[in-house]
Amino acid sequence: MTTVDTDRAAAAQPPPAALPPPMRLREVVFGAARAASVRAAVRLRVADALGDRPASIGELASAVDVEPDPLRRLLRSLACCQIFAETEDGRFRHTEMSRLLREDTPGSLRNIALWCTEPWTWEAWPLLDRAVRTGGCVVNEIYGKDFFAYLHEDAPESARVFDAAMTTSSRQSATDVAAFLDLDGVKEVVDIGGGQGHVLASLLEKHPALHGALLDLPQVVAHADPRLRDGGALASRATLVPGDCRREVPVEADLYIIKNILEWNDESTRRTLANVVAAARPGARVVVIENLVDNSLSSFTTAMDLFLLLNVGGRKHTEESMVARMTEAGLNVTDIRPVNGALHAFDSTVGVPGAP
């Protein structure tokens, strides 16, 4: 008999769709308990402590310095949603999802799990009805200041978690974006609001004749990917441009990439697109890459849409709303295609002044 055959959770838990509606609703409304359980497991580093072989609760409790009984209760709760699994003899083993909570797993979601459950989220989510009623973010109301000002001034640990989560997300998608983009005829590319520049670095590595620029806030580009900085392997073909794309885009290129930054709020989106169009030559190519709430493989994107409403008054876009904003800015959308299961790319060109 295999380990999978003897897992208690596998035997005891029917698939969610098989549950009657009252039980399914109970599962949903207890979602906070599941999220809190994941956060606790990450902070206790249980996934890191558990190796390739099943371990007893005593072994795990000793490894992470906690009481055995509460740890068993935590892991049983997580095993109900296939994060860890309990064997017939009462030990626990890894599952595909629990391995993603390990720090050393390729594609780890450890930092994402922490970011989505940071302390401020437990204060903001209960006010979602207010955000829906008014259409505005609630973080300003809670803390009396802009969300990012709050993070950097009052919650530095949350700011570090945010940076780590964004770095994780960018690294994981950079390879997909580099493989997806056709750069035939492109000599110069600029990544607008590109964070540490993982997408740009991946493109420069794949295309040895390409030159590129990374535009982001001064404190962000100061910590750009080491490959792009002085002495880095790609530094001779990379330019780091400190600035705010909502105020100005001081770079001219053949291709502008705007990935996952047109979601903070509508005014920010309009200013960013207008600044790109103002900087670009007529006919220049602009590729916007975003998660779409109407074309997603999971509920994560729709949840993130509400998350953005709460903290910055932002949104995840539909295909229609993204095309509308790009067209309004003077871009001619020529193609829309999926990059991977989470991202879609909107290919466009800057319109020629006076042209219909």
Image (tube, rainbow, N blue to C red):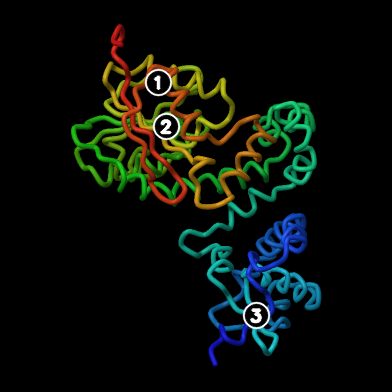
Image spot of residue 214 (x, y percent):
39, 32
Among the two numbered marks 3 and 1 on one chain, the one whose residue lies closer to the N terminus: 3
Give the amino acid type for the residue marked by disc 2 in the picture: Ile
**Mark 2 touching mark 1, by CB under 8 A?**
yes
The image quarter containing residue 273 is: top left
Residue 231: percent from left, percent from top: 33, 41
In what element is the residue under mark 1? helix
Cα distance in 3D space between marks 3 and 1: 52 Å
Amino acid type indicated by mark 1: Val
Q: Residue at x 76, y 64 (%)?
A: 23
Q: Which of these two is toward me, 218 or 67? A: 67
| Circle 3 residue | 92
Q: Along the polypeptide, which appears first: circle 2 or circle 1?
A: 2
Residue drawn at (51%, 35%) of the image: 318
Tell me the tag on residue 258: 2
Quarter of the image for residue 21 reads bottom right
| Relative height, residue 291 to residue 39 (above, below) | above
Of all residues, the one furthest to the top in this rendering is 354
Q: Which residue is mark 1?
A: 276
- The residue that appears at 65% across and 70% down in the rendered structure is 46
Q: Residue at x 37, y 21 (%)?
A: 331
**Residues marked 3 and 1 touching at CB (< 8 Å):** no
